[in-house]
Image: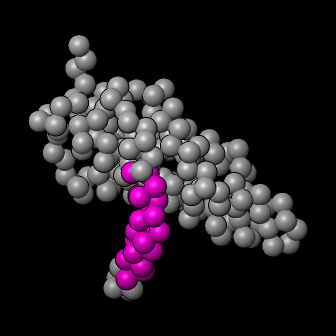
Amino acid sequence: MSKEKTAPETIVKVDPDEVNKIIRKSVCVAMGVGIVPLPFFNLAAVSASSIVMIKSLSKLYGVEFKEGVARKIITAVIGAGVGTLASGPVSSLLGAVPLIGLPLAIATKPAINGMTTYALGHMFVTHFEEGGGFVSVNIEAMKDNFSSAFKNSRQWLGETIKGKEKEAAAEA
């Protein structure tokens, strides 16, 4: 019998600020990596950052982390969300367009990386808050959670950037 938490009555209550801190840190790393115009480096770095984020979230929720399963979930969810994320590969290919391609790719890739990372983080948070773990995975529900979180990520990203601008102006 698994020691992993799966029953609703064993759900761990966590500090939402701690959850947001973990996700925000990973989003910042993903966005920073997006500036580097090397697609394979970009993919590897964002994947590694996402795995670290998921590991931190699973620890916070008291769920045993299984890296191999986490990678398979990410692949299944993002692979299924190709329509939602088609702009990711497109922004990578933009770099090949003479004169305007590289600036356009550099302008879009950080936001796409950030939005995807945000959505992955919130997808796993929802899963853990519902008592799920790495053994009890409903990929269809996770795809729905990812899609919903990805739609919300643009607004969150905009508010976060605006909030940073307001904080910087207030400090000046």
| On screen, residue 164 above or below 65 | below
Residue 114 placement (x, y as % from top left): 51, 59
Residue at the far top: name it. Answer: 1
Residue 118 image-quadrant placement: bottom left
Residue 169 visible in the shown view: yes
The structure residue drawn at horizontal position 25% and vertical position 25%, both measured from the top left corner, is: 4
The structure residue drawn at horizontal position 33% and vertical position 29%, both measured from the top left corner, is: 136
Residue 56 placement (x, y as % from top left): 35, 40
Residue at the far front: name it. Answer: 140
Q: Nearer the viewer, residue 119 or 82?
A: 82
Q: In the image, is residue 165 part of the stretch drawn in magenta?
A: yes
The structure residue drawn at horizontal position 25% and vertical position 17%, both measured from the top left corner, is: 2
Residue 133 placement (x, y as % from top left): 31, 32
Q: In the image, is residue 147 part of the stretch drawn in magenta?
A: yes
Judged by its main secondary structure, the magenta piece is helix
Q: What's the image's color scheme?
A: one colour
> Seen in the image, is 133 located left or right of residue 13?
right
Residue 8 placement (x, y as % from top left): 16, 37
| On screen, residue 19 above or below 112 | above
Residue at the far right: name it. Answer: 98
Q: Nearer the viewer, residue 172 or 24?
A: 24
| On screen, residue 126 above or below 168 | above
| On screen, residue 164 above or below 123 | below
Tell me the magenta residue range.
145-166
Q: How many marks?
A: 0
Quadrant (top left/top right/bottom left/bottom right) for the C terminus: bottom left
The structure residue drawn at horizontal position 30% and vertical position 48%, both measured from the top left corner, is: 126
Residue 63 image-quadrant placement: top left
Quadrant (top left/top right/bottom left/bottom right) for the N terminus: top left
Residue 53 visible in the shown view: no
